[in-house]
């Protein structure tokens, strides 16, 4: 099944897969000269929440995983090798980085995100959250 996207949406998807940054992908494919960073963040978030875009991104991610033969097991094995080497070389910082990478890969550690479930945020608060996220990118 082929998902029908506009050329800009398709470009956004390809750029997002390449960069891993939705705001950057949006900037590369849409006219943003007169937009504030917060607006770019909002628009890129809207695209990520678009059902067709989400399906296309999943297709592209699957293709890349298959193409590069990347699996959780293969990454885990590489991290195990890196941890072992760091231990042999007595490089505790590298060992810790490998261990943390492995824990994140397996979902044991996640980045904290503040989520308001009440739905009572004002537009100013939403823009502030967007500004903070753009700063994190």
Image: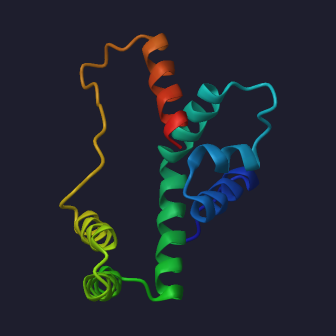
Q: Indicate whether 91 appears above or below 123.
A: below
Q: Residue 14 in the image: x percent, y percent?
A: 65, 63
Considering every residue shown, the one lying at the far front of the view is 90
The image quarter in which residue 95 lies: bottom left
Vertically, is 124 above or below 10? above
Q: Position of residue 114 (x, y in %)?
A: 29, 31
| Residue drawn where x is 26% and y is 65% of the image | 100
Residue at the farthest left position: 108
Q: Is residue 80 above or below residue 96?
A: below
In the foreground, 41 or 75: 75
Q: How many marks on residues? A: 0
Q: Residue at x 66, y 59 (%)?
A: 15
Residue 86: percent from left, percent from top = 31, 82
Q: Is residue 34 left or right of residue 99?
A: right
State the image coordinates of residue 31 (x, y, percent, origin top left).
80, 37
Q: Is residue 60 found left or right of 122 in the rendered image?
A: right
Using the image as rendered, state which of residue 22 and residue 110 is in the foreground.
110
Q: Nearer the viewer, residue 48 or 99?
A: 99
Q: How is the image coloured?
A: rainbow
């Amino acid at each position: 099944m082929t998902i029908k996207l506009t050329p800009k949406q398709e470009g956004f998807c390809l750029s997002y897969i390449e960069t891993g940054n939705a705001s950057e992908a949006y900037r590369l494919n849409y006219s943003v000269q007169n937009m504030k960073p917060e607006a770019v963040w909002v628009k890129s978030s809207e695209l990520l929440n678009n059902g067709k875009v989400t399906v296309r991104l999943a297709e592209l991610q699957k293709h890349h995983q298959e193409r590069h033969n990347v699996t959780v097991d293969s990454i885990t094995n590489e991290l195990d090798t890196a941890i072992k080497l760091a231990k042999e070389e007595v490089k505790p910082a590298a060992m810790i980085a490998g261990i943390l990478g492995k824990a994140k890969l397996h979902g044991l550690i996640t980045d904290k995100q503040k989520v308001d479930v009440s739905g009572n945020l004002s537009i100013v608060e939403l823009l502030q959250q967007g500004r903070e996220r753009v700063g994190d990118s």
